[in-house]
Image (cartoon, helix red, strand yellow):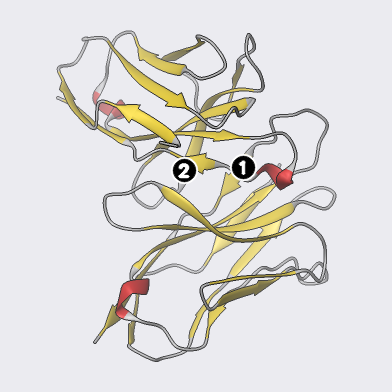
Amino acid sequence: GNSVTQMEGPVTLSEEAFLTINCTYTATGYPSLFWYVQYPGEGLQLLLKATKADDKGSNKGFEATYRKETTSFHLEKGSVQVSDSAVYFCALSDKSEGSARQLTFGSGTQLTVLP
Amino acid sequence: NAGVTQTPKFQVLKTGQSMTLQCAQDMNHNSMYWYRQDPGMGLRLIYYSASEGTTDKGEVPNGYNVSRLNKREFSLRLESAAPSQTSVYFCASSPVGRGNEQFFGPGTRLTVL
């Protein structure tokens, strides 16, 4: 079955540091890949996505590239801010037939950015 | 648009009690989902509904039932709550296509004593 493995946290960085959160996946076929962010006390929000190999998703300074050869979708940001403190989830959706394609989530990585 | 709304926000139950978690979306999405979130385990799918009138089991359906009341509403019922069902519950919805981007509600924090 499908699975997502992401870097265990928590991760603590100083403001303006470089961020990488690793994510690798196992899936049949060619899934769509997502990063979701969860701020304290809130639901998940889509941060970025990529639907095919070599696609780069980007949003709010975050980037991730769909690497089929390494089955990875690592999240990066060049300069983090205190406001980026949140839990980040990597997820995949297979492209099987049917209109409700399930998401498989990683376990989440807690990021804390210190001023 | 309110997006995805959930009620209640918080709930405390005693073992054996029943309750229904409500979810509604105003984005005209076909598909709706219920997840539970537990520490260190990410989100796990309980049930989903591909379209009005259909429901299917997800990864962890035991102890739960669902009803897709209409296109907007998808409820989750705990018939006899157990401490193992203490969790945060999220409802989500998605349109057809768009790579299955899902839109999440704010969650319900449930404690079963």
**Residue A97 position in % (x across, y down):** 83, 31
- Whether callout 1 and callout 2 share a subunit is answered no
**Residue A26 position in % (x across, y down):** 71, 55
Q: Quadrant of residue A16?
A: bottom left
- Mark 2 neighbour class, 10 Å CA radius: few under 14, some 14 to 19, many 20 or more: many
**Residue A47 position in % (x across, y down):** 53, 61
Tell me the residue at 27%/16% (across/down).
B81
Disc 2 is placed on an element classified as strand
Is residue A109 shown to the viewer in this render?
yes
Q: Quadrant of the C terminus of chain B?
A: top left
- Residue receiving disc 2: B43
Q: Quadrant of the N terminus of chain B?
A: top left
Q: Nearer the viewer, residue B75 or A74?
A: B75
Look at the picture and state if A103 lies above or below B34. Answer: below
Q: Amino acid at mark 1?
A: Leu
Q: Nearer the viewer, residue B66 or A83?
A: A83
Disc 1 is placed on an element classified as strand
Q: Nearer the viewer, residue A101 or B93?
A: B93
- Mark 1 neighbour class, 10 Å CA radius: few under 14, some 14 to 19, many 20 or more: many
Q: Chain of mark 1?
A: A
Contact between marks 1 and 2 (CB within 8 A): the answer is yes
For residue A64, the mark is none
- Residue receiving disc 1: A103
Q: CA distance from mark 1 to mark 2?
A: 9 Å
Q: Chain of mark 2?
A: B
Q: Amino acid at mark 2?
A: Leu
